[in-house]
Every structure is written in C-alpha cells, then in structure tokens.
Amino acid sequence: MERARGFLELTRPGNAAAAGALTFIGAFVAGGLSAPLEAAAAVAATVLATGGGNAVNDYFDREIDAVNRPDRPIPRGAVSPRAALAFSGLLFVVAVGLTLLLPPLAVVIAVVNLIALVAYTEIFKGLPGVGNLLVGALTGSTFLYHLGASVLALFALAASATMAREIVKDVEDVAGDREEGLRTLPIVLGRRRALAVAAVFVVAAVVASPVPYLRGTFGPPYLVVLAPAVVGMLAAMYRSFGAPATGQRWLKMSMFAAAVAFVAGRAAVVL
C-alpha cells in the first residue's frame, strides 16, 4: 500500500486533476463540448501528461527534495528513482496515445507540452525566470485545445498567474535550490525583487481578466463572478511578501476562481 500510495503521490493527483479541469473549462468556454469524445480525450491526456511530468520532476529533483520536501515518495523511500522514471514514461505513452484522437493542432500542442515537461527540470528550472515562464505557459496551454478569443484571454490570465505563483514557490525553496546550485529568480535577484517581478505578472493577469467582457464575448454575470477572483489574486500577492507559502496557495485558488468566472460567462451566453 505504501508503494501504491507513493506512485499516486508522484503524480500530485490534485494538480493533475486541476489541469484536467482547466482543459475541460477551456473546451466548455470555446464550445468544444460539441465533440464530447475529443473533449474527454483532451482532459484524460492532460491529467496523465501532468502526472507524468510531476513524476519525472520528482525523479530529477530527488536530491533537492531531500532538503526541501523529504516527505516526497522518492526521498522517503516509498518509490525508487528508477521506478518513478518508468512510471512517468508509462503515463506519457498513454497520454500520447490519447492525443491521437484530437485535431492536428491539439496534437502539436500536446507533443510540445510533453517535451517541455521532460526538459523543464533538467534544462530550464535552474535558469532565472525561464523555468517559471515555461510552467506558466504549460498551465495556460491546457485551455488551448479548443481555440477562441475568450480562451486566449483565459490562457493569458492563467499563464500570468501561474508565473507569479511559481516565483513565489521559488522563494519558499531557496535553501534547497541554492544547495543544488540552481539560479532561480530569488537567488539571483533576492527575495523582495523576485516577489516584485511576481507582482507584475499578477497585475498582468488582472488586466487581462476583463477582456472577454470588453470585447462583448461575455456579459455582466462574468464580471460578477470574476470580481472576487481578482481581489483574491491581489490579496494573495500582497500576502506573499510576508508568507510565501500562504500567498502561493491563495494565488492558485484565485486562478481557479477566475476560470469559474469564464464558465459562468459562457453559461450565461448559452442559456
């Protein structure tokens, strides 16, 4: 049971399920639910690919996690590094198979994302800001399987908010990242300057959020649901300067609240 639990934890099931939910939201907002098989395949592929990416991230980060997160499956001995790598490969293979059910553009997005997930930890994570930007783009791209103007706005919002959250997370992980020789933004710029950069991306997300209303895509119901999410993002960024762990959690919740606003906006149009 401990080994099975370890494999499940490698996927970070909450994050994987959240990524699948974002893909579903993107399909709904863009009207993609008219093709339910494609929407289901996109959601399943996103969940599996995210889980595989998280597992391979744990494989490459096993020495850093021994310092920052010793309770993760590999550091605590629940799963061996080799088993984690094989498990990640299996999830990627199934995800790729599912993408073959999607339109060509969606297949391209999925393949690029899979390559980026594998390359993230080994190549980009230690480059100041580059790894954060990549994770932001990957999160935002979960909406792009069904393109549309409102989906592009959702991509911009999610990518910017995730970029900010990733920088705040790096502030939390300075000790282990410095020991591993990584050059994250907080290490290169210092804690407060890195958080100031994160704040810029939060402002960008807030600025992008009303675009569907201003373009006439969504009506007032969208703004009503969006308002608390925007307030939440700003409060989360303010909180991050004093308590990064709390701030990054608030940022994540606020981003999902903003996604719900897109659902409300789309639902009001449909109904």
Image: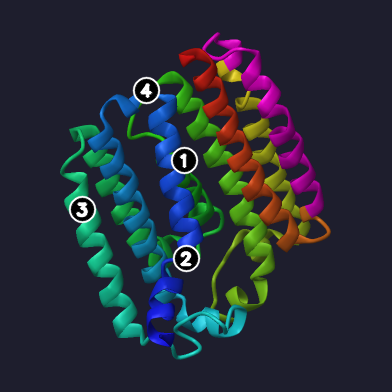
| Residue 222 is covered by the magenta coloring | yes
Query: What's the CA distance linking mark 3 and mark 2?
Result: 19 Å
Q: Are marks 3 and 2 in contact (CB under 8 Å)?
A: no
Residue 182: quadrant of the picture: bottom right
Residue 12's label in the rendered image is 2
30 relative to 157, above or below: above
Depth-wise, is mark 1 or mark 2 nearer the camera?
2
Q: Viewer-proximal residue, 242 or 93?
A: 93
Q: Amino acid at mark 2?
A: Arg
Q: Residues within 10 Å of mark 3 (few under 14, many from 20)?
A: some
Q: Are marks 4 and 1 in contact (CB under 8 Å)?
A: no
Name the residue located 46 percent from the left edge and 46 percent from the top edge: 139
Q: Which element type, helix, strand or loop, lies under badge 4?
A: loop
Depth-wise, is mark 4 or mark 1 nearer the camera?
4
Q: Viewer-proximal residue, 205 or 189?
A: 205
Q: Viewer-proximal residue, 44 or 176?
A: 44
Q: Which element type, helix, strand or loop, lies under badge 1?
A: helix
Q: Which residue is mark 3?
A: 96
| Residue 265 locus on image (x, y percent) | 56, 21
Q: Which residue is mark 4?
A: 31
Q: Which residue is mark 1?
A: 140
Point out the tag, 2 or 4, that comes first from the N-terminus: 2
Point out the tag, 4 or 1, that comes first from the N-terminus: 4
Query: What's the CA distance linking mark 4 and mark 3?
Result: 24 Å
